[in-house]
Image (tube, rainbow, N blue to C red):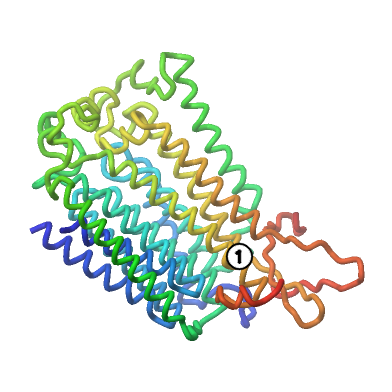
């Protein structure tokens, strides 16, 4: 049930990328898709009544194996969050350049204008 | 209990996403995206990932700053003219078909709360959890994975960060040479 | 970032608040970085907090104050040298032991646990990642906010960005 909700969030982002005319709205659609994917990956690894994968004093390693959440998707998602920031920076740079060249953020107007 | 809470928070994120895409004011759209990211950070706290919650919160602040700084100064109102009806209907229909396929595929996963590592004892995560502390000496198993067991991923991420930032720098550089016909260049407004 | 007032930056309240709070934010970033192997934290969070400190300084005081000591050259040097040092430390495992990313210090001198100076190379890796991400994201903010107006054809204003620093009074 939760996985279906994550997928619905992904589809809302997909609607934003394909159906919108403003470039900033398209960038926001990309951001929504990325949030939904990160959330889905972490929700895959949850264990019922699980603890965070941090060892405390006096705890043996068996307790971790029995009742910790999966640490491997978390390692992937941390890298994915910072990479998403770099992708956003590049998209915004392209959007600014397009505005400087055509004077508008509307992609249908950009199709009509000649450069 | 956790499942109910996380479901409600994701439902709130869906509503926020629809508001962010449909509003006509760009500033409200960017603020809604900030709300989505903060709610995602709370979800991460409920699921047992405190490291990612703090990273997501700080990165969300930076996303809002970059979006406002770079785009709001140019264009405050968006003009959404007539949208063609036929293309919109076909796209929405295709998205609904995609939702049906995804719903069918996602119901074959393990149920929520029963991850794959509890079924298979030879998964790599079990080995990282069992002998991570003795082999590396780090408490935080996530740090031990990121910098000792899977260090190559971290190293490749540096390369991707370089490509993104220096690509943006190359796009935004001054491109025009000074024309020979005498059109002057006046630099005020620093 | 041009304002109508004589002094650049924001109003007096913002400046005083930023002056008080900036050192604490920087300290928090250092704490998140150095304790990355003991408690849930890491180099990624600490690096982004570093960048936020400098962005706060740029927004509150204007860009001239910040570009004087962290211009283009310094940010480039920090960014690239952190990545090269990361590679060198990773390669040093090959010289001493067997594998590529071997935790050499932990194998040769196993230290007491739960301390700040434990876990071998991992605090160094955290610090280098934090410097790299902090310098890189600060460069990004400077790219988007330093502008110069160029007039062409008399009526069309093309706003371009120039990434310069103002050491010794001249633009390089």
Residue B36 position (above or below residue B161): below
- Crowding around mark 1 (Cα neighbors within 10 Å: few <14, some 14 to 19, many 20+) is many
Query: Which residue is drawn at the image coordinates 13% and 36% (left, top)?
Result: B118
Judging depth in this view, the residue of A112 and B29 nearest the camera is A112
Disc 1: which chain? Answer: C
Residue B176 position (above or below residue A49): below
Quadrant of the rendered image containing residue B110: top left
Q: Quadrant for the C terminus of chain A, please.
A: bottom right
In what element is the residue under mark 1? Answer: helix
Judging depth in this view, the residue of A84 and C44 nearest the camera is A84
Q: Position of residue B113 (x, y in %)?
A: 12, 48
Left or right placement of residue C145 versus residue C20 in this view = right
Query: Which residue is drawn at the image coordinates 77% and 72% (left, top)?
Result: B187
Q: Position of residue B64 (x, y in %)?
A: 43, 67
Residue at the far right: name it: B181
Q: Position of residue C119 (x, y in %)?
A: 32, 28
Query: Which residue is drawn at the image coordinates 58% and 62% (left, top)?
Result: A93
Residue of label 1:
C63
Judging depth in this view, the residue of B154 and A55 nearest the camera is B154
Query: Which residue is drawn at the image coordinates 48% and 15% (left, top)?
Result: C95
């Amino acid at each position: 049930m939760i996985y279906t909700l994550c997928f619905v969030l992904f589809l809302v982002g997909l609607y934003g990328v394909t159906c919108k005319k403003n470039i900033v709205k398209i960038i926001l659609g990309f951001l929504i898709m990325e949030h939904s994917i990160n959330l889905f990956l972490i929700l895959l690894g949850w264990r019922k009544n699980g603890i965070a994968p941090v060892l405390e004093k006096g705890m043996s390693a068996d307790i971790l194996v029995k009742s910790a959440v999966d640490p491997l998707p978390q390692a992937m998602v941390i890298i994915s969050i910072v990479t998403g920031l770099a992708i956003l920076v590049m998209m915004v740079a392209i959007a600014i350049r397009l505005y400087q060249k055509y004077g508008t953020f509307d992609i249908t107007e950009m199709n009509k204008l000649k450069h | 209990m956790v499942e109910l809470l996380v479901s409600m928070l994701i439902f709130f994120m869906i509503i926020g996403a629809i508001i962010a895409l449909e509003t006509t004011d760009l500033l409200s759209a960017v603020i809604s995206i900030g709300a989505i990211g903060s709610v995602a950070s709370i979800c991460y706290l409920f699921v047992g990932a405190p490291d990612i919650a703090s990273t997501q919160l700080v990165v969300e602040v930076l996303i809002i700053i970059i979006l406002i700084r770079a785009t709001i100064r140019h264009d405050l109102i968006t003009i959404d003219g007539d949208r063609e009806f036929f293309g919109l209907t076909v796209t929405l229909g295709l998205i609904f078909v995609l939702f049906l396929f995804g719903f069918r595929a996602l119901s074959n996963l393990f149920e929520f709360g029963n991850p794959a590592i509890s079924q298979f004892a030879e998964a790599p995560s079990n080995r990282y959890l069992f002998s991570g502390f003795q082999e590396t000496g780090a408490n935080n198993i996530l740090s031990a994975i990121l910098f000792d067991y899977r260090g190559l991923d971290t190293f490749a991420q540096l390369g991707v960060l370089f490509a993104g930032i220096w690509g943006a720098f190359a796009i935004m550089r001054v491109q025009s040479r000074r024309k020979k016909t005498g059109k002057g260049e006046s630099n005020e407004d620093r | 970032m041009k304002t109508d007032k004589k002094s650049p930056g924001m109003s007096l309240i913002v400046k005083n608040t930023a002056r008080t709070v900036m050192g604490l934010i920087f300290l928090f970033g250092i704490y998140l970085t150095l304790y990355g192997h003991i408690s849930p934290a890491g180099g990624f969070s600490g690096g982004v907090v570093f960048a936020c400190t400098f962005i706060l300084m740029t927004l509150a005081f204007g860009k001239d104050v910040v570009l004087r000591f962290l211009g283009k050259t310094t940010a480039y040097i920090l960014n690239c040298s952190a990545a090269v040092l990361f590679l060198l430390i990773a390669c040093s495992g090959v010289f001493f032991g067997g594998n590529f990313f071997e935790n050499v210090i932990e194998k040769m001198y196993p230290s007491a646990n739960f301390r700040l100076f434990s876990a071998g190379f991992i605090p160094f890796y955290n610090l280098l990642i934090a410097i790299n991400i902090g310098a890189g994201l600060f460069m990004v903010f400077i790219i988007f906010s330093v502008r110069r107006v160029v007039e062409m054809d008399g009526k069309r204003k093309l706003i371009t960005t120039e990434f310069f620093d103002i050491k010794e009074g001249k633009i390089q």
